Image: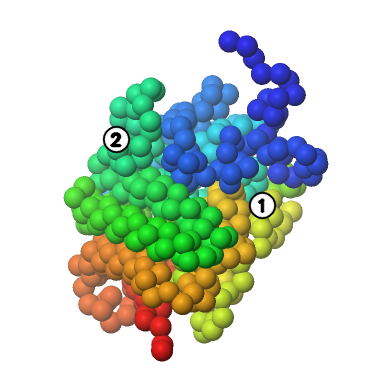
Amino acid sequence: MQSLHINHFLSLQRPDVFAPAAAGIPDVSTLAAHDFDVDTRTGFMPPQPPIARLPAAWELWEATLDDAINSKLELVDKPGISQDDEERSAHWRSSVRKLPILCTEEVKASEILLRRGHCVLAWIMHFYVHTTPVSEMSIHIPAPVTVPLLQICAQLQLPPVLTYSDDVLYNWAFKTPPAANTHFEPKNELYNLRCNTLFTGSTDEEEFYLSSARIELRGVEALSLMRAIMDEAFVNDAIAHRRITSYLTELAGVVRHCRQLLGAVREGCDPSTFYHEIRPWFRGCDSDTRGRRWVFDGLELDPSLEVPTELSGPSAGQSSMIHALDIFLGVDRYSHSNFKAATAAPATPPAFPPPLQASSSSSSSSSSSSSSSPSHAATPFLTRMQKYMPRHHRAFLRHLHTSPRPLRQLVEAANDDRLRAAYDEAVTALKEFRDEHVRIVALYIIVPARQGQGAAVSTGAGVPKGTGGTDAYQFVKGVRDQTAGAIMGPRRV
């Protein structure tokens, strides 16, 4: 096979995010970078299964994660945890502290390696945090994890914590690889997926992640319909309106199927098992029930590193697919405006967040260890969750948000009752998707919490925290209610 010429754009090295881009040089960090890393076959998921293991140079990270999983480490606050469990966890944490600080220069050359590196190190960090004795109110993340993780995060422009992309987008493989000579059809592969990495190794945990992965794949058709509608919006005549009406009806059908896929999580993931055995592993710093600080040791070893300020952990609110639907339908002005702490929801659409800097952190430190106590009072929760998305996907949402012909404005301006009804059908389908999300949160978080805490939750004490420290149930209910507020209803004559 003939190799590519050294100057071919696919032979170019992945660009360093800190180096100014030369004019005319394409972004080749991924094959679809110029299309916002959104694939026509798999959407926001990569077109090929993510790598399940780093090369030999970083085998120590993989082996450390394997050791944590194979040792069946237990959550430190698990009721009845044995002394043997505590000693096994202590031994593993000691091994993490003794690791050498591995160089990440070669990792930076590949987006694929960076993604796996982020996944492995973040998983190690969560194992470390959630097995640290509860008596320690400051959890010190060892330098062998802190330094490479933050270096990788700076390149990916992601926070140093597990994200939705770690658990869902880049944590899958096919059970049976699709035939190479057949057209890839996402709908046919929804149940042909498995996960690469799990905390518990349980089918419940795997099914929890895969339910979101199936929604991502099913949403590929929604992205295609959105693209077709945007094309027609540029024409904006009576024929285009009829086509947009038809596409919106199809879009509503896709969203309704996504609602069914969301509800199907009940078939494979037990609510009590999820709440007590799975969910605590991926809690972030700002949803720590004990308010413990995460202290990142070793920042002085690399002066470019900064104190992390985003440590919320993974959330379905980090799904670029759902954000894309919100923005495309013009619903984000409603759904993204709640949970702005200590402020009222704005009457006008919130400004779209500016591009993130190379690091997700906002304050630097020259000390040998620095702690993070996140505070995000000024930013709506769903807007802030975009910081946890892959940077190309954030760019896609920004691009979508700046469309010169927003769909909602087109529908409002058109004297077309059928178009208006089709638009409302699509928004209603999204609202019903969030109805299902409210039911899932109640079943998987509120009910187990009440069973475990008795009357404490019903009286307002110990209300379960969601990602980012929000009141889990009130948040999803608020987003659902505000989505319903975007339904236009019939035109006033």
Q: Earlier in the sequence, mark 2 or mark 1?
A: 2
Q: Mark 1 — residue?
A: 359
Amino acid type, label 1: Ser
SS assignment at label 1: loop
Label tally: 2
Within-10-Å neighbours for mark 1: few <14, some 14–19, many 20+: many
Q: Residue at x 32, y 42 (%)?
A: 187
| Quarter of the image with the N terminus in it | top right
Q: Mark 2 — residue?
A: 192
In the image, is 1 to the left or to the right of 22? Answer: left
| Quarter of the image with the C terminus in it | bottom left
Q: Position of residue 319 (x, y in %)?
A: 45, 55
In the displayed structure, 244 sits above or below 419; it is above
Within-10-Å neighbours for mark 2: few <14, some 14–19, many 20+: some
Q: Residue at x 41, y 47 (%)?
A: 220
Q: Which mark is residue 311?
A: none
Give whichever of 35, 415 is nearer the camera. 415
Q: Residue at x 37, y 81 (%)?
A: 490
In the displayed structure, 272 sits above or below 20; it is below
Amino acid type, label 2: Asn
Q: Position of residue 8 (x, y in %)?
A: 71, 25
CA gap, disc 2 and disc 1: 36 Å
